[in-house]
Amino acid sequence: MTTGRRRDLALHLLDRQIIDTDGDAVGNVDDVEISEEGYVTALLVGPQALAPRLGGLLGQWLAFLSEGISRSSTAEPTRIGIDLVTDYGSAITVARSRAELGAHRNEDRARDYFIGRIPGADHARD
Amino acid sequence: MKKVLQVFLGVLTAIGGFVDIGDLVANALVGSRFGMSLAWVVAVGVIGICLFAEMSGRVAAVTGRGTFDLVRERLGPRAGLLNLVASMAVTFLTLAAEIGGVALAFELVSSVNYLLFVPLVAFLVWIVIWRMPFASMERMFGIAGLALLVFAVAVWQLGPDWGGLAHQATHPVVPDGEGHPTYWYYAIALFGAAMTPYEVFFFSSGAVEEKWTKKDLVIERVNVYIGFPLGGLLSLAIAVATFIVLFPEGVEVSRLDQVALPVVLGAGKVGFAFLIVGFVAATFGAALETALSSGYCIAQYLGWSWGKHLEPRKASRFHLVVLMSIIAGSMLVMTTLDPIKVTEYSIVFSAVALPLTYFPILVVANDSGYMGESVNSRFTNGLATVYLVLLTVVALTAIPLMLATKAGQ
């Protein structure tokens, strides 16, 4: 999948769940990047990508919130090149782990500051 | 043999898990004020929850996606968010009511004010979610909830006029002294109690947690089609019990000890012990389900990793949301808002919020691109359409009726 995908696919891709090679959740397709020729070139993940799509006060609020959490006003959404996508099913599978994609900054913060500090956080219980 | 046992346990869990504080309060209240004249609503509600839970469980088993994942995908981020906020608000109210309910049951046996138990209950809810495996958690509280069958025993011991009850249930009339708007307001409350949205979030996310696939669909259907109707019968037994004992005295249920009275009269001290065990199990189990559901909904909407099957480190944001909802829910109870009153409002708001998640699930259950051969049958779609209309009418009339009747006074 080296060539970009056509624009009408964009509608199909938006808001889908993305999972990585290990089956872990990476995020939702919060927006897509479209080239001048009208091809989808990348999936964008993160509140920074979602905020403009929500629009209005709600979008501004989300952008404000995510800036506050990431402590930076220049944080970019995670960009996943369309050539990394290996499967379009009920979820979109990408050929990288979520750590490699860097789509995980807020999850890492929640773990480092709160959840990871509680005893038993590394036990799976199913 | 193992399969039979699994199905059997699943059904028992579904029966015990069906009843929560909403069903208890609504049925007791309706029984004491309207007798059997609203029994038909329980039947309508049970068919509705069977339909809704079966569809969402099937969708989850086939696609591996939880409810809010699909809600956002189908409705887009804006409408999806509105939906999320409404569903979360109702689920949060229910969580607070369940935590309060467990504390009230502790007050009933200890005579110590329930507010003192709230922090303890909140901690227990959290620790069970944190440590106990999903399947054992579900089974333990579901099966212990079967102790509520003591209501059926009490009814049988009290020896009611069965023919009269049946006649009242099949020929419903508004009792003297009650207005039509109040009757319909309580019809909606009872309906909302039977069809609470969190049950569906929990059921479908649970299917993903337990890694259900197409092969598990038979078990899923048996659980739903047998377990839920029996759970509905159990909740009717509560209405019958309060009807026999409290209706003739003109007592309107507003406290938990009034709900216990028919059991004590019919089944004595042992019955009371069973009642407490069943009540704690049912409300505690539902507190777990609602707390988890808040995490499921938000995580699915935002595409986070979620679930008890992961180690908490791998689903940190999910666990953070669950923990915060438990804290916030117990803080709401600590404001001394009456948990019974909170329950009454939460079941009516449940009825209002239902179409928001029902509609997207119905759409996905018909999408053959997702569901393959497991799409809705014609029969299911026919029934589902009738319910879509019904749910919309109920959602639109609930708030006006609430205002007109001053919340059923």
Image: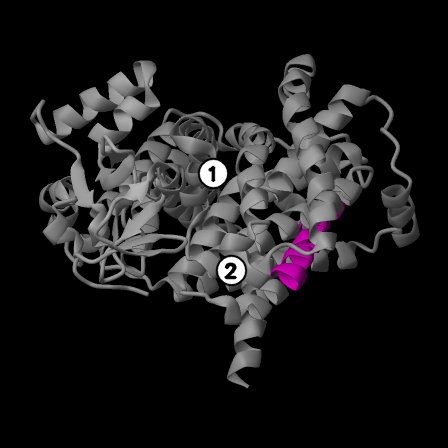
Q: How many numbered discs sit on the rendered protein? A: 2
Indicate yes or no whether the magenta region holds residue B239: yes
Q: Which mark is residue B142?
A: 2
Q: Give the residue at x 40% y 49%.
A: B288
Q: Main secondary structure of the magenta part?
A: helix
Name the residue tied to disc 1: B74
Q: Residues within 10 Å of mark 1 (few under 14, many from 20)?
A: some
The C terminus of chain A lies in which quarter of the figure? bottom left
Q: Give the residue at x 65% y 15%.
A: B406
Observer able to see residue B241: no
Read off the magenta span. B224-240
Please tell me which residue lies in front, B9 or A35.
Answer: A35
Observer able to see residue B164: yes
Residue B310 position in % (x across, y down): 26, 59
Residue B294 position in % (x across, y down): 38, 40
Q: Secondary structure at mark 2?
A: helix
Q: Which mark is residue B146?
A: none
- Residue B395 against residue A39 in the figure, above or below: above
Residue under mark 1: which chain is it in?
B
Residue B63 position in % (x across, y down): 45, 57
Indicate yes or no whether the magenta region holds residue B147: no
- Residue B292 against residue B32 in the figure, above or below: below
Q: Amino acid at mark 2?
A: Gly
Spatial CA distance of label 2 from label 1 is 33 Å
Residue B351 image-quadrant placement: top right
In the image, B155: left or right of B406?
A: right
Q: Secondary structure at mark 1?
A: helix
- Residue B39 against residue B176 in the figure, above or below: below
In the image, B329: left or right of A109?
A: right
Residue A47 image-quadrant placement: top left
Q: Amino acid at mark 1?
A: Arg
- Residue B354 against residue A20 in the figure, above or below: above
